[in-house]
Amino acid sequence: MTKPQPLTRHIVSINDLSNREIETVFQVAYGFLKELADHNIPYRIGRGTSVASKFILASLFYEPSTRTRLSFESAMLRLGGANITSADPAVSSAAKGESLADTIRVTSNYADIIVIRHPRDGAARLAAEYSQIPVINGGDGSHEHPTQTLCDLFTLRSKNRGLRNMKVAISGDLKGSRTIHSFVYALARFGATIDPLPAPGMELPPHVARRLREEFHCRMVSKSPNEADGSIDALYVTADQPHQLSLYAEPEIDYGLVLQKKIDAVYVTRFQKERWTEKERPYPKIDAKFLGEGKYSHASVMHPLPRVNELDAALDSDRRAIYFRQAAYGVPVRMALISLLLHLHRSKSLHKFPGGFAKAEHPLYVQRIGTGIQCANPNCITNDPAERQYAANKFYIMEDHSPQRCTLRCLYCETDIEAEASAHFVVSDSTRKTYSPGLAALKHTPADKLRHLVIHNSEADAEAAGFAPRVGGKKAHAG
Ligand code: NCD
């Protein structure tokens, strides 16, 4: 009898990992550090093992990278495996116009695990759909960068016992930074308080803020309740039940205390100029003067790097600066993730990673390619002309409090189609050949019947596609 193959697991979002699985990654990473660290530098992996010998990592990078690609490749070599790399789209078949979907179908026969970085939001999810082997997201547009978050949490964890009741300030381009998006979800899930310090006009995107509130039980608390405009000056405080099982046995959150508490870490990000049309914007600089304020006296200073001008190099010798250690942890953390995804551990005590994505919690509308609406995010992979034939639009139907409404969330880039953008949408029924205005029909249709529906941009689009208005439950007759 043949042995059943372990299922393929993809890590596209930090939310593809449960809190317990994140703890498992850390447990394995600590194990590698204990066994293989440099004798003089405890956070640096200095030796190798052979657990992944004969396994191959393919690194497909469609955007510049230093830390992510090199630490993944170093991790694979330290595990005893090998790397094949496509680090420059100009010298791969992407330059000839090959789609990501085809590249992945081909590459997944050449390697055992893929790490991908791409400028489009949702590209890693599309890659995972076409891959037969595990896909790890090394950063997709401004969507997410889950393995950076693992390094960030591991760094925080090495300084503090747990994250619950911690207060973390996040500074800079909170809109364009994918590292921030993965990080805030994780902070919220582990019960940390987030103190946003955005550059002007670079606040957290509305869909991220909405998810923090609605899915991860964050509360928005004004820092200065007497001020009329508390929109930027807000703290996100997690409610007392973290989203998923947490292994940290810590006391309930005391909101009063948290608000008065000093900052435990300041996480700095650079202006993501490649995601903005303007090449310069007013931007906060974190330096000794900024950190001179009493509340930062014990704050660790973190940065996913590269830094440009937003973090003063004079801080490098400050006892609070931990960003180079944070980058060094990329190796043990990625060794742990790769070895878990490849099922290389024999220990029964390690919680095993089951296959697939985290289970979808919302009904999914899958649209036939070439029909209906498009994702509203122009940078979504589904809006890439090279991928249109391969990426069907797929939207989660998110509950809205009103019975007549619902919000659509793109499965790939996870942005929501906001109410104004969907104001003229109609839902067409391909069995009856009728359409009804608004999105209410989606809410009243059982999940297994959703495949009969098509969302059109407008009545005119539905009529052009051969649908007639549905009046009082019946098709309206012309004339
Ligand atoms: C980040 C990235 O690429 O998103 N870098 C990294 O992976 N360490 C941060 C950035 O580029 O600003």
Image (cartoon, rainbow, N blue to C red):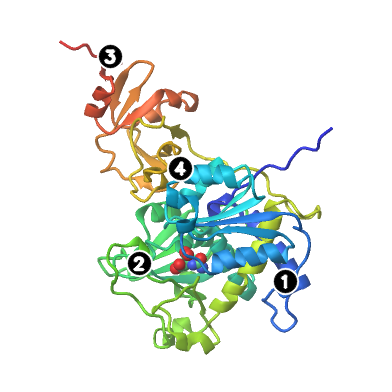
Q: Earlier in the sequence, mark 2 or mark 3?
A: 2
Q: Mark 3 and mark 1 in contact (Cβ < 8 Å)?
A: no
- Give the alpha-carbon distance from disc 2 to disc 3, as whole Å: 51 Å
Residue 164 appears in the figure: no
Q: In this view of the protein, which residue sits in the foreground, 201 or 314?
A: 314
Say the numbered circle drawn on residue 411.
4
Q: Amino acid at mark 3?
A: Lys
Q: Residues within 10 Å of mark 4 (few under 14, many from 20)?
A: many
Residue at left offset 55%, top offset 65% = 68
- Give the alpha-carbon distance from disc 2 to disc 1, as whole Å: 35 Å
Q: Mark 2 and mark 4 in contact (Cβ < 8 Å)?
A: no
Q: Marks 1 and 3: which is nearer the front? A: 1
Residue 442 appears in the figure: yes
Instruction: Determine the secondary structure under disc 3.
Output: strand
Looking at the rendering, which quadrant does residue 470 occupy?
Answer: top left
Looking at the rendering, which quadrant does residue 460 occupy?
Answer: top left
x then y, percent, for residue 49? 78, 65
Q: Is residue 394 above or below residue 77?
A: above
Q: Amino acid at mark 4?
A: Leu
Q: Amino acid at mark 1?
A: Leu
Q: Which residue is mark 3?
A: 475
Q: Which residue is mark 2?
A: 273
Q: In this view of the protein, which residue sits in the foreground, 149 or 383?
A: 383
Q: In this view of the protein, which residue sits in the foreground, 109 or 24?
A: 109
